[in-house]
Image (cartoon, rainbow, N blue to C red):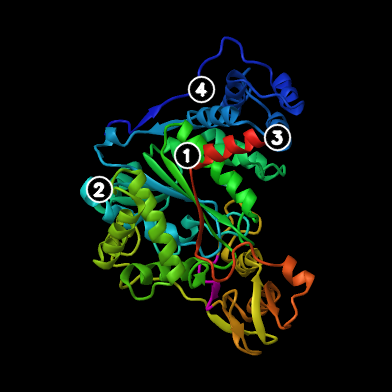
């Protein structure tokens, strides 16, 4: 087989600029030049002992300077470009795939199983145009679940298949949900590990470059971004979510990748279940039509409509949504999911016999008082699942328990009677179930007073209980217009 990827390393420099003046320039608030940014990225991937290499301390110092001083859009584009080309850039045409290459990225949430259903749905809806969806996904991060962890709840599913197996899955199913290989954006791999332990994750330009470098290296032609907002999101407030969404679509557009962001509700768990095996079960039920929670369906179809339009398969998002809805109804998306799972080593008949393990302990969590559910701390629910063993406490290669999680979650805005269930806990043992039940009770703010106190008003969710799941749509055009408008006002 021919080499699937084009290797593009950092451009050789006659003499690499020293790291110290680059760090000092950003520390003092200057914009970095493209050669300075290239030197930084090259320094992340250069061999130990080489002149070009930046130490962890130097990379962390620059990351912190960027967190504090920011980067303008020219710098962010340059950083994204350099990180994209720090490793291999996939070329699907060279592999014989001529159709649009589509993908979706979510900034992470609780109960977010959209990737599991959207990848086969896009492949089915766009099959006539030759759409493929090579979805490079991640593991759980902090309180959020990870698509790869969910799929590994299926016995035998391999998230790092040999390249031939990946190609077979794409040929047979039109989609493949897998992890990033070590060759894809290696500068991000090193920088992300450094940021993770140096309090330098929370930076719009760094997050933008990190997400987009991996997506651009994956050879996409259109990308739809699901930027979550609310108590369970990385960006809890609307202005923060907007800033990230605008940066992502602008920089993607600057790199030639058509992209659009939907800002979506993470003031409640998405769908009916949160937890790895439980979410796979829900995804299968969604695809087969056995159960489709309306907000999960609305979000999935909205993202599908945008992706199909951006990829040139649909004339507009509404037509894309109709194509996706038809693909769901005719069952083709479910069949593609089954073919993908089988090709990647999972159960041969996943729709009928997924082989998902169930937790040995199940218990309901009764509401301690009657009232209206005013707010749910979704981050706390995510952390309760991590504590049950459904996520990693210490990171790295720690094993997780795919069986555990939460289902039957009461929703914001709902009236609840004392003793009625807030949720059902799925746990490995009674002690962890009791701890999770206490965490669930603490995560629910039940408003039992007719008087709206100042504290209750301050605790108002960003997304109101009766609001649609898609809060806003941000595309490069509106983002640039908004940026220009705010510049002309200031
Ligand atoms: N996800 C990423 O891939 N990178 C970040 O920096 C944050 C979230």
Q: Counting residues from the N terminus, which is met first, the one under dot 1 or under dot 4?
A: 4
| Residue 182 in view, yes or no | no
Q: Main secondary structure of the magenta part?
A: loop
Q: Counting residues from the N terminus, which is met first, the one under dot 2 or under dot 4?
A: 4
Q: Counting residues from the N terminus, which is met first, the one under dot 3 or under dot 4?
A: 4
Query: Which corner quadrant of the image does residue 333 belong to?
Result: bottom left
Separation of marks 3 and 4 at Cα, in angstroms: 20 Å
Label 4: element kind: loop
Query: Which corner quadrant of the image does residue 419 belong to?
Result: bottom right
Q: Which residues are magenta?
A: 401-408
Q: How many marks?
A: 4
Q: Is residue 162 magenta?
A: no
Query: Which corner quadrant of the image does residue 303 belong to?
Result: bottom left
Q: Is residue 66 above or below residue 266?
A: above
Q: Quadrant of the C terminus?
A: top right
The residue identified by callout 1 is: 477
Query: Residue 10 shows which numbered tag?
Result: 4
């Amino acid at each position: 087989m021919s080499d699937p990827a084009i290797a593009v390393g950092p451009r050789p420099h006659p003499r690499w600029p020293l790291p110290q003046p680059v760090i000092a320039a950003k520390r003092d608030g200057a914009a970095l030049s493209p050669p300075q940014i290239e030197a930084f990225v090259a320094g992340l991937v250069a061999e130990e002992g080489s002149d070009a290499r930046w130490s962890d301390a130097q990379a962390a110092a620059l990351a912190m300077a960027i967190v504090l001083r920011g980067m303008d859009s020219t710098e962010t584009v340059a950083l994204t470009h350099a990180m994209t080309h720090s490793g291999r850039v996939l070329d699907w045409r060279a592999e014989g795939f001529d159709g649009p290459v589509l993908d979706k990225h979510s900034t992470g949430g609780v109960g977010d199983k959209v990737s599991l259903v959207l990848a086969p749905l896009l492949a089915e809806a766009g099959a006539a145009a030759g759409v493929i969806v090579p979805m490079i996904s991640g593991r759980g991060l902090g309180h959020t679940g990870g698509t790869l962890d969910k799929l590994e709840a299926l016995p035998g599913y391999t998230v790092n298949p040999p390249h031939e197996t990946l190609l077979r899955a794409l040929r047979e199913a039109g989609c493949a949900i897998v992890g990033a290989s070590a060759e894809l954006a290696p500068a991000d791999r090193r920088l992300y590990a450094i940021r993770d332990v140096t309090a330098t994750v929370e930076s719009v330009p760094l997050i933008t470059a990190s997400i987009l470098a991996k997506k651009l290296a994956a050879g996409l032609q259109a990308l739809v971004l699901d930027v979550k907002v609310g108590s369970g999101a990385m960006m809890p407030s609307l202005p923060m979510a907007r800033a990230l969404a605008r940066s992502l679509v602008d920089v993607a557009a600057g790199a030639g990748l058509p992209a659009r962001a939907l800002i979506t509700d993470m003031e409640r768990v998405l769908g009916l279940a949160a937890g790895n095996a439980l979410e796979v079960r829900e995804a299968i039920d969604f695809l087969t039509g056995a159960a489709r929670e309306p907000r999960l369906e609305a979000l999935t179809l909205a993202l599908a409509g945008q992706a199909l339009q951006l990829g040139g398969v649909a004339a507009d998002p509404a037509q894309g949504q109709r194509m996706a809805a038809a693909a769901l109804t005719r069952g083709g998306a479910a069949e593609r999911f089954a073919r993908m799972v089988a090709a990647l080593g999972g159960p041969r008949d996943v729709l009928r016999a997924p082989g998902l393990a169930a937790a040995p302990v199940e218990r309901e969590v009764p509401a301690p008082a009657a009232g209206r559910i005013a707010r749910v701390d979704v981050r706390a629910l995510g952390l309760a699942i991590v504590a049950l063993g459904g996520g990693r406490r210490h990171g790295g290669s720690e094993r997780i328990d795919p069986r555990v999680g939460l289902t039957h979650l009461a929703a914001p805005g709902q009236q609840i009677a004392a003793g009625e269930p807030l949720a059902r806990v799925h746990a490995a043992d009674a002690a962890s179930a009791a701890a999770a039940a206490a965490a669930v009770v603490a995560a629910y703010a039940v408003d039992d007073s007719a008087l709206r106190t100042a504290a209750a008003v301050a605790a108002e969710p960003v997304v109101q209980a009766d609001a649609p799941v898609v809060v806003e749509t941000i595309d490069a055009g509106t983002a640039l217009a908004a940026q220009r408008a705010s510049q002309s006002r200031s």
